């Protein structure tokens, strides 16, 4: 019933769903699955299977977190996603491109660290209050 875990879980869902929907579905001005996959494999050099997995995780994990179903596995998937994303932003340094000083698409990795911290809360505490995980545990236990 931890409200902190609930806040972390819902924050992850709210922040990452739009980004996943951009990459997977082309919503919110995104390019959709095929174009994102081509960019990840061509520009970033990710192996095709890992690029596809990243796009699926980026869409499915926030949805799972929203309802609190498989919260820990969803957060773990986002940890992998963020570590992969950090590898592409490492050369841009720590800070995000707050003032537009870097070219488009170049951001530091501070955002990724915040997402990792929220994932850490969910990994440590579970889905928290109002999660399907908690409801299932109470019902089975």
Image (cartoon, helix red, strand yellow):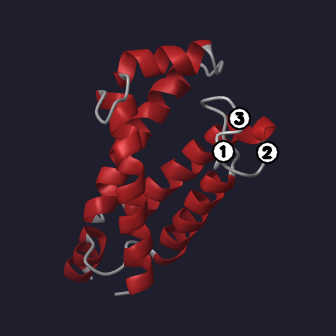
Mark 2 sits on what residue?
93
Mark 3 vs 2, N-terminal side:
2
Question: In x, y percent, where is residue 117?
Answer: 60, 66
Q: Please tell me which residue lies in front, 93 or 68.
A: 93
Residue 100 found in image quarter: top right
Disc number placed over residue 102 in the picture, else none? 3
Above or below: residue 122 compared with residue 138: above
Above or below: residue 45 compared with residue 86: above
Cα distance in 3D space between marks 3 and 1 = 6 Å
Residue positioned 50% across, 48% down in the render: 77
Mark 3 vs 1, N-terminal side:
1
Residue positioned 69% across, 33% down in the render: 88
Mark 1 sits on what residue?
97
Residue 9 found in image quarter: bottom left
Question: In x, y percent, where is residue 34?
Answer: 38, 15
109 left or right, relative to 29: right
Above or below: residue 56 compared with residue 63: above
> Can you tell which of label 2 and label 1 is closer to the viewer?
1
């Amino acid at each position: 019933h931890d409200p902190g875990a609930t806040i972390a879980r819902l924050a992850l869902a709210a922040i990452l769903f739009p980004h996943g929907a951009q990459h997977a579905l082309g919503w919110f001005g995104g390019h959709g699955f095929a174009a994102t996959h081509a960019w990840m494999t061509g520009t970033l050099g990710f192996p095709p299977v890992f690029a596809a997995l990243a796009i699926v995780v980026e869409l499915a994990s926030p949805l799972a977190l929203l309802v609190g179903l498989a919260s820990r596995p969803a957060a773990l998937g986002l940890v992998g996603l963020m570590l992969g994303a950090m590898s592409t932003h490492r050369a841009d340094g720590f800070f995000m491109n707050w003032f537009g000083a870097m070219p488009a698409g170049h951001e530091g990795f501070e955002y990724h660290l915040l997402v990792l911290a929220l994932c850490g809360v969910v990994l440590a505490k579970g889905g928290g209050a109002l999660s399907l995980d908690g409801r299932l545990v109470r019902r089975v236990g």
